[in-house]
Amino acid sequence: MMGGADEPPVPATVDLPRLPAVGPLYRRALRGALPGGRRGGTLPAVALTVAGVRVDRTHLADYDRVCGFPLAERLPVTYPQVLGFPLALRLMTAPDFPFPVTGLVHVSNRITAHRAVLAGEPLDLTAYAEHLRPHERGRQLDVVLVASAGGTEIWRGVATYLSRGRGGDGGARRDRGDRPATPAATAHWRVGTRIGTDYARVSGDHNPIHTSRLGARLFGFPRPIAHGMWSTARCLAALANRLPGAGTVDVAFKLPVALPGTIGFSAVRADDGWDFALHDPRTGRPHLVGTVR
């Protein structure tokens, strides 16, 4: 089905009987990274759905431990993205997806919770890609994951990825101005090497840049780096008792967090929520900046 003249095509829905296993998808991703593979020039016009997904409470408790959330009946606002990650990975490793998933850079993330999501309720999950667009360093796209209950959307996550290389806007880099002053740290966190493998285990995201020194070096990093969504979750866990059930989290990923290392966390109350950030305590350079509204 096609949308209006100014709208993108409405994606065709493909119902899957269950969430896919991530192991075969990563093997597909590695094959897709080999030179000579054929790629489409547009995003696949398909939405993948799985109905009636239930939370494994043992897995939830493990996720809470790795990220620092307290055990609660209300899901951490980042958890549905982990729950639906296999669906998004299936979409991104399809032969007609325009970029190899192993080369994509997660540059920002927006999560909107319309209400608290409870651990005991079954969820219908949908994943699709949209808004392929030029960027000064290549091309960007959004991978959208939606969680619904009883036919009503209750949670939406939009992950923005950058494919570096050709296809950018061809213009000069925008003037970014002076870097803002580093906020005073609310806390300093020592992040061990194992956080990469621990978060990979609970999230399903086994990208080797997070779990292997060799894998990190192949992609230009001297050491493994923390997952951006672990960094986001760790910040929100520090604010967990002060966050409402509904709201929007916006995060921009700046410099990677090399493992092991020490990071500074700051949180400042705003009129309608919180501003938070992670930075390098020695240089003040930002790893992540975010808001909760």
Image (cartoon, rainbow, N blue to C red):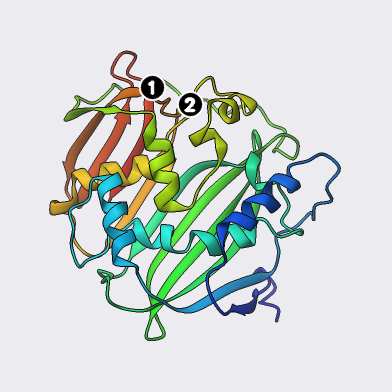
* Rendered position, 264 above or below 151: above
Seen as rendered, the residue at the extreme top is 282
Residue 180 visible within the image = no
Picture quadrant where residue 87 is located: bottom right
**Relative vertical location of residue 138 with respect to residue 10 in this rendering, above or below:** above
Q: Nearer the viewer, residue 80 or 218?
A: 218
Question: Percent from the top left, x then y, of residue 38?
Answer: 84, 51
Query: Which residue in the structure is indicated by mark 2?
Result: 176
Amino acid at the residue labelled 2: Arg
The residue lying at 13 percent from left, 53 percent from top is 241
Element carrying mark 1: loop
- Left/right placement of residue 74 relative to residue 220 reads left
Snapshot quadrant of residue 199? top left
Q: Secondary structure at mark 2?
A: loop
Q: Residue furthest bottom?
A: 150
Q: Quadrant of the C terminus?
A: bottom left
x%, y% of residue 181? 29, 21
Mark 2–mark 1 Cα distance, whole angstroms, equals 8 Å
Q: How many marks?
A: 2
Please say if the residues under marks 2 and 1 sit with CB atoms less than 8 Å apart.
yes
Q: What residue would you read off at disc 1?
A: 179
Residue drawn at (55%, 67%), measured in percent from left and top? 127
In the image: residue 210, left or right of residue 27 = left
Amino acid type, residue under disc 1 in the picture: Arg
In percent of width and height, residue 233 lies at: 32, 47
Q: Residues within 10 Å of mark 2 (few under 14, many from 20)?
A: few
Q: In this rendered view, identify the residue nearer to me: 7 or 235.
A: 235
**Vertical placement of 274 versus 118: above or below?**
above
